[in-house]
Image (cartoon, helix red, strand yellow):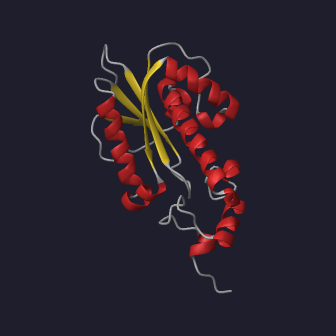
């Protein structure tokens, strides 16, 4: 429940289920009007990019990024917990709403499934996290062109798995994330 006179800080992440690249989290308190906010996955890349600048100009925000190596070392849940704590530390005196159903043991956070589609502050956080992550993975595509990161953004598509089979995992792949087609033996 939001306390009177305290702003709402929406929090979301991007890249939780990827097999390459960073996990990125963002917290956003809107300070001005931003039209057209919704879940970042429902927007085109061009629209997300346009909204990103508008959000930055009309918000207090904090973005946290955990590279693949850190996700491997700490685990996804610990990264999410640390990201939530970092956002709370950088955006104090707010009420916090995190998209999903778990606050990963961090106090004073309310969770809500599909908040990224229903609550403007969480939609804005969703957009900042996704655009930040997409920009990073497109830059990685230039360093590792054989994986096609620019098209699948590090998710486990068939083409991405085939590239891993052919070239092995790069330094930006999450080595602890098991890929069924590669990591699990078959009878044939």
Query: Residue at image x 45%, y 20%?
Result: 59
Q: Residue 44 placed where, x, y %?
A: 70, 33
> Can you say which quadrant of the picture contains the N terminus?
top left
Q: How many marks?
A: 0
Camera-side residue: 63 or 117?
A: 63
In-image side of 158 versus 136 (left or right): right
Query: Residue at image x 49%, y 31%?
Result: 125
14 lies above or below 119: below
Q: Residue 39 lies in what quarter of the image?
A: top right
Query: Residue at image x 59%, y 28%?
Result: 38
Q: Residue furthest bottom?
A: 187
Q: Residue 83 placed where, x, y %?
A: 37, 42
Q: Residue furthest front?
A: 143
Q: Residue 137 placed where, x, y %?
A: 60, 47
Query: Residue at image x 33%, y 38%?
Result: 86
Camera-side residue: 19 or 42?
A: 19
36 lies above or below 173: above
32 lies above or below 130: above
Camera-side residue: 55 or 33?
A: 55
Q: Is residue 30 visible?
A: yes
In-image side of 4 versus 149 (left or right): left
Q: Residue 42 placed where, x, y %?
A: 65, 34
> Can you say which quadrant of the picture contains the C terminus?
bottom right
Q: Is residue 103 visible?
A: no
Camera-side residue: 113 or 52?
A: 52
């Amino acid at each position: 429940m939001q306390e009177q006179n305290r702003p709402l800080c929406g929090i979301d992440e991007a890249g939780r289920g990827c097999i390459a690249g960073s996990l990125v989290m963002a917290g956003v308190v809107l300070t001005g009007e931003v039209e057209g906010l919704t879940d970042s996955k429902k927007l085109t890349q061009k629209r997300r990019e346009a909204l990103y600048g508008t959000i930055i100009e009309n918000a207090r925000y904090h973005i946290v990024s955990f590279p693949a190596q850190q996700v491997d070392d700490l685990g996804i849940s610990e990264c999410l917990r640390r990201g939530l704590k970092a956002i709370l530390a950088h955006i104090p005196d707010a009420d916090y709403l995190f998209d999903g159903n778990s606050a990963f043991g961090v106090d004073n956070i309310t969770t809500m499934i599909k908040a990224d589609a229903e609550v403007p502050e969480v939609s804005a956080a969703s957009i900042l996290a996704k655009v930040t992550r997409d920009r990073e993975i497109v830059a990685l595509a230039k360093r590792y062109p054989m994986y096609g990161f620019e098209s699948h953004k590090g998710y486990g598509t068939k083409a991405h798995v085939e590239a891993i089979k052919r070239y092995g995992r790069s330094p930006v792949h999450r080595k602890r994330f098991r890929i069924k087609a590669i990591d699990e033996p078959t009878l044939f």
